[in-house]
């Protein structure tokens, strides 16, 4: 059977898609409004999974919907070259078998086939991406722009993983604070308190943003802020129907709320209490400015409570439709 005939009977031509120098395979979200580029490391993650999640918008579809334009152009060019090579081989064979034919000595016929240029191979380069992540649920290794993402294999959002990693750094800073001179110690503790809240805020804002976007199917520029516990709780109730206060006991909620108010005083008033702080924390108004103090134990306790709030929120959002 001729090579070309054999090729024509095939329903598809198999093309192996090159990976980057670290073995990662490029992917692109098929959603027009997203078109997010990411990479996955084949051989890690869930075995045999055919569903892929976009790390940016959470859209899910079968793996064959996530080829990049560069990969498709490359595959097309490889397929065209295979067809062209088959055509060259068949016509060359035909020309050889034709040989030289004569009709009574007057006319001599001969056939020769000269192959033309093969279609150009469309090579491409995978882009460098900012963050490499290993999913804590399915162990898939993947790379994305930015830092927050859905896992392309299991669809879990990595925001809680990032929050926990950042809280470990804060715990490390608190241990360090116990070993240094007083002035530096105070600065480290105050920074740790500020970081605890900023980390929760970054986590909560991104988690709620992608959830709102996924749920409504429309772009959401900003999620819910978590710099004030009461404000976040109110917004969550109104926008997503989540009761954040259920994450803690009423006493724990109060402790956490007051620590977050304290953070506000350090961040915006050099640690000096104002009327608003005294009112919000249920303290008597007094003459003169009062310096607020904070110690490692209080920050550790706040960190634990905020971690529980984050874990609760993550679970609530994951089970939400
Ligand atoms: Zn997407
Ligand atoms: Zn995963």
Image: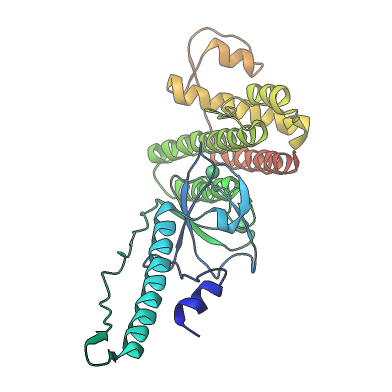
Q: Is residue 102 visible?
A: yes
Residue name at image x 43 percent, y 63 percent: 75
Indicate the quadrant of ligand 2 in the picture. bottom right
Is residue 230 positioned above or below 242 on the image? above
Q: Quadrant of residue 44?
A: bottom right
Front position in the image: 239 or 115: 115
Front position in the image: 301 or 227: 227
The furthest residue to the left:
106
The reply, left or right, for residue 64 in relation to residue 28 is right
Name the colouring of the figure: rainbow
Quadrant occupied by the C terminus: top right
Residue name at image x 41 percent, y 71 percent: 83
Front position in the image: 143 or 10: 10
Front position in the image: 122 or 297: 122
Percent across and percent down for residue 56 are: 53, 43
Percent across and percent down for residue 166 are: 51, 47
Percent across and percent down for residue 210 are: 59, 37
Residue name at image x 34 percent, y 59 percent: 124
Q: Quadrant of residue 100?
A: bottom left
Residue name at image x 59 percent, y 15 percent: 278
The reply, left or right, for residue 93 in relation to residue 229 is left
Is residue 205 positioned above or below 151 on the image? above
Percent across and percent down for residue 261 are: 58, 24
Label count reads 0
Q: Can residue 18 be seen in this view?
A: no
The furthest residue to the top:
287
Is residue 172 positioned above or below 2 on the image? above
């Amino acid at each position: 059977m001729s090579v070309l005939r054999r090729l024509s009977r095939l329903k598809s031509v198999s093309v192996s898609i090159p990976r980057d120098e670290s073995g990662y395979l490029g992917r692109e979200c098929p959603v027009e409004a997203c078109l997010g580029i990411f990479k996955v490391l084949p051989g890690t993650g869930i075995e045999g999974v055919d569903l892929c999640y976009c790390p940016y918008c959470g859209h899910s579809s079968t793996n064959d919907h996530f080829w990049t334009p560069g990969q498709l152009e490359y595959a097309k060019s490889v397929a065209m070259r295979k067809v062209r090579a088959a055509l060259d081989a068949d016509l060359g064979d035909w020309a050889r078998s034709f040989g030289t034919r004569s009709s009574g000595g007057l006319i001599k016929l001969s056939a020769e086939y000269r192959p033309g240029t093969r279609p150009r191979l469309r090579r491409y380069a995978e882009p460098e991406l900012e963050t490499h992540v290993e999913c804590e649920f399915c162990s898939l290794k993947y790379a994305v722009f930015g830092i927050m993402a859905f896992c392309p294999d299991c669809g879990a959002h990595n925001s809680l993983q990032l929050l926990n990693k950042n809280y470990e750094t804060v715990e490390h800073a608190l241990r360090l604070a116990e070993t240094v001179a007083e002035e530096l110690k105070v600065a480290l503790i105050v920074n740790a308190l500020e970081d605890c809240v900023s980390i929760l805020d970054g986590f909560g804002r991104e988690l709620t943003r992608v959830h709102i976007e996924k749920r409504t199917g429309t772009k959401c520029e900003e999620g819910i802020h978590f710099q004030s516990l009461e404000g976040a709780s109110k917004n969550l109730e109104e926008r997503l129907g989540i009761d954040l206060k259920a994450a803690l006991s009423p006493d724990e909620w109060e402790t956490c709320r007051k620590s977050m108010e304290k953070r506000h005083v350090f961040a915006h008033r050099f640690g000096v209490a104002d009327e608003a702080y005294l009112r919000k924390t249920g303290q008597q108004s007094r003459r003169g400015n009062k310096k607020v103090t904070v110690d490692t134990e209080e920050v550790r306790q706040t960190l634990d409570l905020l971690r529980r709030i984050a874990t609760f929120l993550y679970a609530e959002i994951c089970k939400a439709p």
